[in-house]
Image: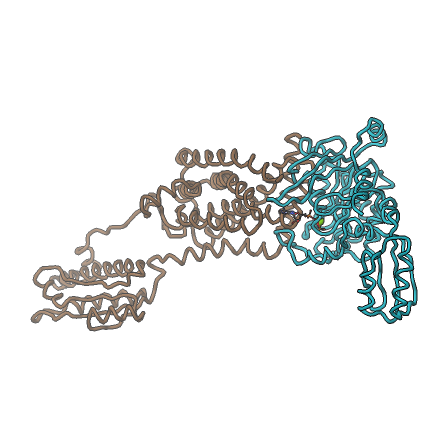
Chain colours: A cyan, B brown
Amino acid sequence: MHAEQEKIISDSWMFPTTYNQLVSILVSGVMIETRNLTKKFNGLTAVDHVSFNVKKGEIFGLLGPNGAGKTTTIRMLATLTRPTEGTATIGGYDIVKDDNEVRKLIGLVSEKIIMYDRLTAKENLWFFGRLYDVPKEVLNERIDELLRLVQLSNWKNSQVGTFSSGMRQRMNVIRALLNMPEMLLLDEPTLGLDPQSSVEVREFVKKINRENKTTIILTTHMMVEADMLCDRIGIIDHGKIIALDTSANLKKLVSGANTTVLELEIANLTTNMVSLIQSLKCVNSVSQDNSTHIKVHANGDESFDTIIDSVRAEKGKINSVKNLDPTLEDVFLYITGHEVRDKADRKIPVRRHKHSMPRSRVR
Amino acid sequence: MGIKSLVSHSLMIAWKDLMELFRNRMMLLMLVLMPLLMMTMAGFMFPSNTSTSHVSVALVNQDEGYANYPSASATLIAALETMNSSTDMMTTTSASSLDEVRSMIQAGEVEGGIIIASNFTLSLVTGKQGAITIVTDQTNPQMSMLLQIALKEVLEQMGTWLAQQNVQGLNPAVNSNNSLAIVKPYIVQTEGAVLGDFSYFDFIAPGLMAMTVMMSVMTGLPAAISHEREVGTLDGMMVAPINRLSVILGKTLAQTARGMLQGTLILVLAVFLFGVTIRGNILLIFALLLLGVFSFVGLGVVITSFAKDQETAMMVMMALMFPMMLLSGVFFPIQQMPWYMQSISKALPLTYATTALRKVMVLGANVSMITTELAVLIGFGVVMTTIAVPVFKRAMTR
Ligand SMILES: Nc1ncnc2c1ncn2[C@@H]1O[C@H](COP(=O)(O)OP(=O)(O)OP(=O)(O)O)[C@@H](O)[C@H]1O
Ligand SMILES: [Mg+2]
């Protein structure tokens, strides 16, 4: 499956090689351009020759498992870490040479919450706003407006240390908007939030993008999030971008490759049955969701029949069969050959950051 | 990026740091408690003559007397007791021999011993010097000094006493006050360069002030920056289009304010609680403290740049702080140290700040008398800052 697939993928993120492509990008406007962006930490390559463009007004997603290099990429773009190799420009400014110009254009929502616990919501926003030289009257109004947008007006004079994670994260997001940036860098903006708050934050991000024409680059390890928010998605694994396209096109990769995703509910499901399905030639992978549900990825025209037949042969009682549309999860699985969650689970015991996390945040 | 925004950003950062500090009750408490503790502990840790009492001493009287002469040892012991009754300095236990005293000291029963030789009366009567041995605990050098001082006083007292009795015996009209004047027509007193009482507090107050202010910057700066780096809030400042210098400048300002506050607290405590008199110009004192801060900032910034996390920063700090505390003449005069220690101490900026501050506070010196110290402090500050700025800029974008 690999040779053909790599070609499709590489075409989609190749640099403009022809004059026409170049013109089209100039007309549409490129906000971010990275070329072979690389970061090494004492021998470990966290980001490995990453090249992509983000158009003006676009929401671009970097999707990848823990330790893929998302945060490192964002930090390089935010001028907080210097790349070991390669270059990137934001709004035409080089992230190393013109770092201060880049800083004027961007707002950063970091993985860690950038708020001082002992200052009130207003004091925090005032402090950061003044660092951007926002005039005092304008800043006062802007703070009120931003707090209203995230429904924190009533908490204006409360210390951020007393806030819930959801409230802190909302503060973290509006902090990045104080200078009305042209470009917003969001590193896992819904990390640690409950589904309700996650939806709110996502809606908010969409709103900023729609109303202010803000270009957004966001990282996430959640497929749903990337799917919902992003115009284009770069899938990053082991520091490399392994696929880059719109969500729809990425899914077509899977269906185009004649892949079937089936969800079966079998009343008398046994482990024996699962391993039997697994051993079928057409089946790529089987994952068991609970005692009766399994999800099967299979290849080829006959795969549907073959699977049903083998279950019947084992006297399995099929309650329901769903032929699923491929999700980004399936895309990830298809491209990398391993599941996102698998990898995340395996990685959890390893401390990825040397320093301890001061605020514990639920993943 | 002009000077104006550099200043305004620095002030903003200083404001933020101070707000955080003042909202932190625990920190505030420590801020007030530290100088108080330091002052009290340092003051009582090093005993002056008056502050010691009830030192247990073993007394061995081997004096065999001489013919019908009154026993000199009895007079000595009486003098000792007279002094003791007014000062409560010692509690005496009798013992029989040097060996017994030694074992008593080893067992911790007594802290020292006084042995009156068997020919004590004989020697005095025949015009020789009477021998008294002081047995001391070598692990406690302070005690040996104390016993010597006490004994000297007692012996002097005893001599005066004997002579007084002799004079009174010669002429009954002379009362005790007159006899004292006849026997001891002059009194020797030690006088300092300035008038007034001089206690250990006068000695340590300037040193403690210099140390507190300078250390608060040297340790506070790396601690504050590495803390923010770990929590992640430093990124919030670094991602803003501000001069990187305003981060150190702002933080230094906040730490200086904190240090000066503590320094002032020490000064107030010293004056009102410990009776220290300030003879120099108050403004000059504060100016000196600020200069001390300036000379130390660079060092703090260099440590900040090299220490990646808070723990490392604290370790480096500790390693630097202790020798500096001990070698800069804050607690002991550097003149007491061996020459090689003195030369190390001469390389430490804190030494100069302490000396200058002491000269101003205790001796009432003015600027012209502390030019050497000023030159060294300014020089050290300029050199360290010149090194620190580029190092910091490099370290902030690794
Ligand atoms: N300061 C650092 N020093 C050394 N190694 C680092 C540092 N920062 C990141 N790494 C390493 O670089 C790799 C990528 O880390 P990064 O934080 O970019 O991953 P991520 O995609 O953001 O992961 P997550 O989803 O967990 O946030 C990891 O293996 C990590 O251990
Ligand atoms: Mg990350």
User: Does residue A282 appear in this view?
Assistant: yes
Q: Residue at x 36, y 60 (%)?
A: B51
Res. B164 image quadrant: bottom left
Vertical placement of B242 versus A265: above or below?
Answer: above
**In the picture, which quadrant includes the N terminus of chain B?**
top right
Q: Nearer the viewer, residue B63 or B320?
A: B320
Instruction: Residue B94 in the image: state x and y as whole percent.
Output: 23, 73
Answer yes or no: is residue A141 visible: no
Q: Nearer the viewer, residue B127 or B294?
A: B294
Q: Is residue B375 toward the left or the right of residue B167 in the image?
A: right
Direction top: furthest residue: A19
How far across and down, in percent of the image, does residue A82 sit? Answer: 65, 38
Please state the horizontal and vertical placement of residue A118, each as a whole percent of the image.
67, 52
Q: Which residue is rendered at x = 71% and y = 56% of the image?
A: A361
- The residue closer to the viewer here, B380 or A46, is A46
- Residue depicted at 44% across the width and 57% down the height: B41
Residue B286: x percent and y percent? 50, 41
Number of disc labels: 0
Q: Nearer the viewer, residue B69 or B301?
A: B301
Q: Quadrant of the C terminus of chain B?
A: top right
Locate residue B384 relative to residue B1 in the image: left or right: left
